[in-house]
Image (cartoon, rainbow, N blue to C red):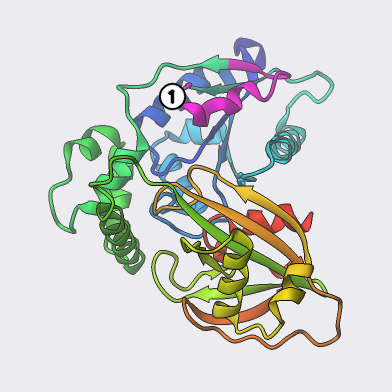
């Protein structure tokens, strides 16, 4: 009966990369306090990466394999896409998702449901608990200080058929350990491990620096007639993914000059630099701390709007780009786009 529970619905938001015993502890507490638990899997619709190796369906499999049949009947799982540079849009997305699920599953529509958010404030990534004052917040103690990051990294550095390290043994439900051991035999895991090794070696180059380095890059968002200019990455990280043309700033050039240089090098766009500079309509810094797996990387992006034309300028991949091509804005797929470039386009193009 709903009256026996403190809440009709509790909401648990997380990335679950991977799902571990700390998450399971929160779920058990939530099901004691609520009739139905809504789990929102964050970082949905993104390409696989060393920070987000598993898709939402895979994470849902991990979660449900750790629960009893009775618990699974009371749990709803839904994807939640990140909106990196717009908290208000992200909050609206959460609200809309929750309202839609409650409308479908609330057993007493004539009564206002009792809704709450459940989680534990482990670090700045849990600030979302304060973004929904209309819902009560339920704080849960961190279970044995378990964290997904060291577990994930231990999985990526360990070789197949080796005994799992203690962090994995103690941190994961048995069903999840079994699921992941099968996943480690798949080709996609080999690609993730190669990417992890590449990033580790990349960071090792800077290990002797007196301070943690911060890198500065530029990106060009070139739009014409409802299309955006993209490239296919030739090398790791993100090999094969679509990306904005751009790269690192050289010591002897301005940000604008670096952006124009990288744009022309990677796409062979035959538009004179003065015309490109004159077509810049917006510029913005994008500095999400997790935007690049290579380390702290801040990019300055320029929105270049070309005059509409029935014929798009010819482009060709070069330098760090395997290919260059125009993509209709409506056909951009975040699951195939590198780092935060999808969100950069959304912000500058006003999508």
Q: Residue at the spot x=45%, y=59% of the render?
A: 48
Q: Is residue 349 above or below residue 61?
A: below
Q: Nearer the viewer, residue 259 or 125?
A: 259
Question: Is residue 193 toward the left or the right of residue 5 in the image?
Answer: left
Q: Is residue 84 above or below residue 9?
A: below
Q: Is residue 80 above or below residue 121?
A: below
**Quadrant of the snapshot with the C terminus:** bottom right
Q: Judge whether residue 339 can be spotted in this image.
A: yes
- How far across and how far down the image is residue 311, in percent? 81, 88
Residue 93's quadrant in the figure? top right
- How far across and how far down the image is residue 267, in percent? 59, 80
Residue 110's quadrant in the figure? top right
Q: Residue at the spot x=47%, y=80% of the render?
A: 319
Q: Judge whether residue 1 can be spotted in this image.
A: no
- How far across and how far down the image is residue 83, in percent? 64, 45
Q: Residue at the spot x=76%, y=76% of the render?
A: 275
Q: Nearer the viewer, residue 251 or 229?
A: 251
Magenta segment range?
A: 121-137
**Quadrant of the snapshot with the N terminus:** top right
Q: Residue at the spot x=73%, y=69% of the render?
A: 277
Question: Is residue 307 toward the left or the right of residue 50 in the image?
Answer: right
Q: Nearer the viewer, residue 319 or 164?
A: 319
Q: Residues within 10 Å of mark 1 (few under 14, many from 20)?
A: few
Q: Is residue 125 magenta?
A: yes
Q: Is residue 270 above or below residue 12?
A: below
Q: Nearer the viewer, residue 67 or 179?
A: 179
Q: Is residue 130 magenta?
A: yes
Residue at image mark 1: 122
């Amino acid at each position: 009966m709903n009256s026996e529970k403190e809440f009709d619905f509790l909401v648990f938001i997380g990335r679950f990369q991977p799902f571990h015993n700390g998450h399971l502890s929160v779920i058990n507490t939530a099901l004691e306090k609520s009739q139905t638990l809504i789990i929102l899997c964050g970082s949905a619709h993104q390409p696989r990466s060393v920070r987000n190796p598993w898709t939402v369906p895979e994470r849902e499999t991990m979660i449900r394999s750790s629960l009893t049949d009775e618990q699974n009947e009371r749990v709803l799982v839904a994807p939640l896409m990140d909106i990196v540079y717009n908290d208000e849009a992200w909050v609206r997305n959460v609200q809309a998702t929750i309202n839609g699920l409650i409308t479908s599953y609330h057993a007493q529509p004539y009564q206002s449901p009792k809704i709450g958010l459940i989680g534990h404030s482990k670090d700045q990534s849990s600030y979302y608990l304060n973004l929904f004052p209309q819902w009560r917040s339920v704080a849960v103690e961190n279970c044995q200080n378990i964290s997904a990051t060291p577990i994930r990294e231990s999985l990526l550095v360990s070789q197949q058929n080796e005994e799992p390290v203690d962090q994995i043994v103690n941190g994961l439900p048995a069903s999840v350990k079994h699921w992941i051991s099968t996943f480690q035999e798949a080709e996609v895991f080999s690609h993730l491990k190669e990417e992890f090794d590449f990033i580790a070696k990349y960071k090792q180059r800077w290990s002797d620096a007196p301070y943690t380095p911060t890198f500065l890059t530029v990106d060009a968002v070139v739009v014409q007639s409802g299309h955006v200019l993209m490239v296919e990455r030739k090398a790791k990280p993100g090999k094969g993914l679509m990306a904005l043309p751009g790269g690192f700033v050289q010591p002897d050039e301005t940000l604008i000059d670096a952006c124009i240089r990288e744009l022309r090098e990677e796409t062979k766009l035959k538009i004179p630099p003065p015309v490109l500079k004159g077509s810049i309509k917006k510029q913005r810094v994008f500095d999400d701390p997790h935007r690049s797996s290579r380390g702290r990387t801040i990019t300055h992006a320029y929105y270049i709007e070309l005059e509409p034309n029935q014929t798009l300028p010819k482009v060709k991949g070069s330098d760090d780009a395997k290919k260059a091509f125009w993509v209709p804005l409506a056909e951009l797929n975040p699951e195939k786009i590198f780092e935060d470039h999808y969100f950069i386009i959304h912000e500058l193009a006003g999508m």
